[in-house]
Image (cartoon, rainbow, N blue to C red):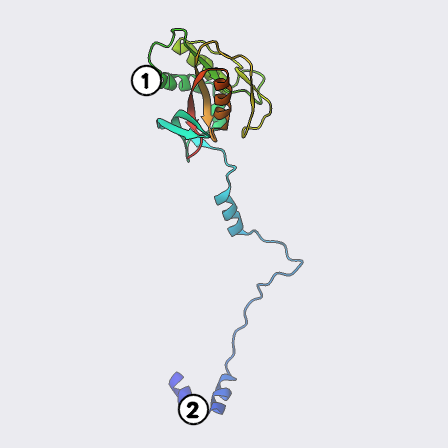
C-alpha cells in the first residue's frame, strides 16, 4: 500500500491530494469542566502518605543497647524505634509491660553502675508528668526499678511549668538527698526533657545519669 502511494507522488500537489484523504481519529476530551466533580488525586494521596510523620511510632523490642548524645545529654536506651511492632500507645496501656521494662532494665543498670547500689549514695527519679494526675507508665516502671535495685524512688521530683517538651523549664520539687541520681524515662525522642532534668539536677548539686527504655528516633 505504501509503495503504491509513493509511486503516485510526482509533485508537492500530489502529496496534498493524498494526505487530504487521511482521516485522523478524534481524541476523547479529558478536560475538566468547572462543574465536574473533583476526582481523587492518587499521586497527591500517595505523596502525603509517604511524608506523613503523624503515624505513631512502634517498637518490636529487639534488644539494641545504645549510648546516644542528644540535646547535650548522654543517655542509654535498650530498645529502638522500628517500622513494625507495637505502638507506644498500646505499650503504655498494657500493664504487663511495666514488669517487662523492669526485668530488662535492671541488668543493664547493674552492669553500668554495679551491684551494690544500696549504700546510701544512689536514688532514682523520672521525668515530670504533664498530663497525668496519678502515676503514669514511666513512674510505675521507675518505682519498680528502684525497688529491684534497692534504692529510694523520689516521686514527682520536678514540676514542669508548661506541657511543651521542647525548651521546657522544670522547677525542683522532691529532690533526692543522695548525690547520684538515675533519671529514667520510658522513651526519648528529642532529648529535651532529659536536658531539662540535667539542668535542674546539676543546679541542685546532683550527679545524674540517664537510662531510658525506647529510643524513639532512628
For the N terminus, the image quarter is bottom left
Image coordinates of residue 97 in percent, x first then y, are 44, 20
Q: Which residue lies at the image location 50% right of the left edge and 48% below the top edge?
A: 47
For the C terminus, the image quarter is top left
Image coordinates of residue 108 in percent, x first then y, are 35, 19
Image coordinates of residue 187 in percent, x first then y, are 46, 26
Residue under label 1, please give it: 111
Image coordinates of residue 158 in percent, x first then y, are 54, 17
Q: Is residue 31 above or below residue 41?
A: below
> How many numbered marks have been drawn onto this rendered protein structure?
2
Q: Which residue lies at the image location 42% right of the left edge and 24% below the top edge?
A: 213
Asked which secondary structure carries label 2, the reply is helix
Is 22 placed left or right of 105 in the picture?
right
Is 44 placed left or right of 118 in the picture?
right
Residue under label 2, please give it: 8
In this rendered view, identify the residue nearer to me: 77 or 181: 181
In this rendered view, identify the residue nearer to me: 201 or 187: 201
Within-10-Å neighbours for mark 1: few <14, some 14–19, many 20+: few
Alpha carbons under labels 1 and 2: distance apart: 96 Å
Q: Which residue lies at the image location 47% right of the left edge and 90% below the top edge?
A: 12
Is 36 placed left or right of 12 in the picture?
right
Within-10-Å neighbours for mark 2: few <14, some 14–19, many 20+: few
Question: Which circle's residue, 1 or 2, is located before the other in the chain?
Answer: 2
Q: Is residue 74 visible?
A: yes
Q: Which residue lies at the image location 38% right of the left edge and 7% below the top edge?
A: 118
Q: Is residue 1 visible?
A: no
Pair 1/2: label in front: 1
Amino acid at each position: 500500500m505504501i509503495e503504491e502511494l509513493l509511486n503516485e507522488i510526482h509533485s508537492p500537489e500530489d502529496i496534498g491530494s493524498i494526505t487530504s484523504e487521511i482521516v485522523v481519529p478524534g481524541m476523547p476530551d479529558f478536560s475538566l469542566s468547572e462543574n465536574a466533580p473533583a476526582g481523587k488525586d492518587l499521586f497527591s494521596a500517595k505523596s502525603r502518605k509517604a511524608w506523613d510523620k503523624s503515624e505513631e511510632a512502634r517498637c518490636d523490642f529487639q534488644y539494641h543497647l545504645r549510648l546516644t548524645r542528644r540535646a547535650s545529654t548522654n543517655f542509654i536506651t535498650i530498645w529502638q524505634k522500628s517500622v513494625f511492632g507495637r505502638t507506644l500507645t498500646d505499650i503504655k496501656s498494657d500493664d504487663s509491660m511495666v514488669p517487662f521494662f523492669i526485668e530488662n532494665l535492671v541488668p543493664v543498670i547493674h552492669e553500668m553502675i554495679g551491684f551494690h547500689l544500696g549504700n546510701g549514695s544512689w536514688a532514682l527519679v523520672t521525668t515530670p508528668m504533664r498530663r497525668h494526675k496519678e502515676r503514669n507508665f514511666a513512674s510505675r516502671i521507675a518505682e519498680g526499678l528502684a525497688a529491684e535495685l534497692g534504692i529510694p524512688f523520689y516521686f514527682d521530683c520536678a514540676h514542669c511549668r508548661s506541657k511543651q517538651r521542647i525548651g521546657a523549664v522544670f522547677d525542683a520539687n522532691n529532690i533526692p538527698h543522695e548525690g547520684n541520681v538515675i533519671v529514667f524515662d520510658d522513651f526519648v525522642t528529642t532529648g529535651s526533657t532529659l536536658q531539662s532534668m540535667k539542668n535542674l539536677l546539676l543546679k541542685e548539686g546532683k550527679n545524674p545519669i540517664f537510662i531510658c527504655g525506647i529510643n524513639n528516633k532512628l
